Image (cartoon, rainbow, N blue to C red):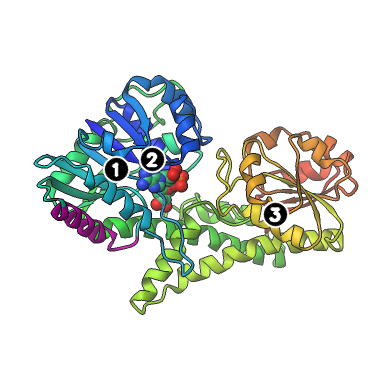
Amino acid sequence: MKVTIIGCGYVGLTTGVALAYLGHQVTGVEKDQDKLELLLQGKSPIHEQGLEKLIKECASRLSFTADASLVVPPADIIIIAVGTPQKENGEADTYYVEEAAREVVSSFVSGRSYTLVVKSTVPIGSNRRVAYVVEKVLSERGNSAQVYLASNPEFLREGLALRDTLYPDRIVVGAKDSRAVEALRLLYRPILEQTFEPPTFLPRPEGYMPPPLITTDPTSAEMIKYAANAFLAVKISFINEIAGLCDKVGADVTEVARGIGLDSRIGSRFLSAGLGWGGSCFPKDTAALVAMASEFNYSLPIVEAAREVNARQQLLIVEKLQGALKGIRGQVIGVLGLSFKPNTDDIRESPAVKLIRLLVERGAHVRAHDPVAIPKARQALSSMEVDFIENPYKMAEGADALVLATEWEEYRFLNLRELAECMREPVLVDARNFFSPEEARQAGFNYLGVGR
Ligand code: NAD
């Protein structure tokens, strides 16, 4: 099928590349010139495992442009994957979605039919708003194109984006018209039937079963996305709340999480206590859900509590440092990890970045390391004095404490003894419960985890 994707960020680019890999003819529309330049050179503007390799491999079926009007007319399916940033009142801003819809519909060829898909995470009712924009633009132009509208929320995890796209748990399509559902069924057929040859670097997970296609109404599809993210955020905040109590009573939250996670009704995932959740989805989507509910004069106390617990997690780490160092002002603190989670360069709402802000505000000299996110973090923290250091051992030299803020796998191979020996005070605050406390202590560290 001929597919046009509007917005080549984490979601749009991954989706486009995966669809090209599956054999579709894909054009990505991206209006950010810097990103477009990279894409035109066959490079990925984001750090995501395997993405650049597939961009190159699929070059014959994948192209990029800034001009939607060139590539929308011949497309069968147009997927809107632009950002929906948080407004001041917590709502998700659908301005870019509606603007993209207007641009797309303006280029429709009269008499043809198109499937227009909203993949961005949008507030309940946005499908109706987009339908309105579509109707308006078509009638203003006397255009007789047939438009079948669908909501197709995205569930990929950054760092595992291609994996989640090729091997999803489910695909959700919300549409009023069955022709939209059928178009998406055809688009995703290779994934739904798992008929494609896996990329060499991304084998089909053992035991993976073809995913179900959930077809529903647009409003339910929109709600599924928000409810899924809110549930996951609540689950993490729950274990963080328990971790705080474990700290007080002397229990080990990693043991507690294991003990409760083996209960199949609970499940072991998303039960890692730590620095809290961040990224471009959970903070924004939980805020949007709360804002949406309040429009209906309805409250979501569980979701609100999850946000509250999350906001205090970074403060708890600051308090641990204060306790261990007897004050933070003037201390040299090295932070390992900047991205909001490993395997991505995304620092949007990163708890590590928030922690650094708190430390600098309290007078610490902060040094920071990350395998890939330093350029983005440098920009985000440009108003603060932070030393970005490419080598963790250099970062530790003469430092008073280290904080493990993002659990990059490569930190597992750090020589803890070497790190501890070159520090002024060998304090290690493991804000992700990543290291073994015994090994860290044997290496000479005063080790502090979260809830253990
Ligand atoms: P992003 O900011 O990385 O990418 C959006 C891209 O769209 C940007 O590159 C921007 O320049 C481009 N853009 C905006 N308007 C455009 C237009 N009119 N024409 C062409 N390009 C345009 O955002 P993202 O992280 O990919 O998220 C996109 C949507 O998907 C959001 O609604 C987000 O909530 C949702 N989502 C994100 C994730 C994730 O992990 N990042 C997961 C699931 C859902």
Q: Are marks 3 and 2 in contact (CB under 8 Å)?
A: no
- Which numbered dot is residue 383? 3
Residue 334 in percent (x, y) is at: 78, 47
Some atom of ligand 1 lies within 8 Å of the CB belonging to the residue at label 2: yes
The three-letter amino acid code for the residue at tag 3 is: Ser
Query: Which residue appears farthest toward the front when viewing the image?
Result: 141
- What residue is drawn where x is 36% and y is 79%? 297
The amino acid beneath tag 1 is Ile
- Give the mark nearer the N terminus: 1 vs 3: 1
Q: What mark, if any, has residue 12 been given in the picture?
A: 2
Q: CA distance from mark 3 to mark 2?
A: 31 Å
The residue drawn where x is 54% and y is 62% is 237
Left or right: where does residue 24 sit relative to residue 169? left
Which residues are the magenta region? 123-140
**Tag nearer the camera, 1 or 3:** 3
Frontmost residue, 311 versus 247 = 311
Marks 2/1: CA distance? 8 Å
Task: Give the position of the C terminus as an image quadrant.
Answer: bottom right
The quarter holding residue 40 reads top left
Q: Circle 3 — which element?
A: loop
Q: Nearer the viewer, mark 3 or mark 2?
A: 3
- Which residue is denoted by mark 1 in the rendering? 79
**Callout 1 touching callout 3 (CB < 8 Å):** no
Please rate how many residues cluster around mark 3, counting C-alpha atoms within 10 Å: few if below 14, some from 14 to 19, many from 20.
Answer: few
Question: Is 136 in the magenta?
Answer: yes
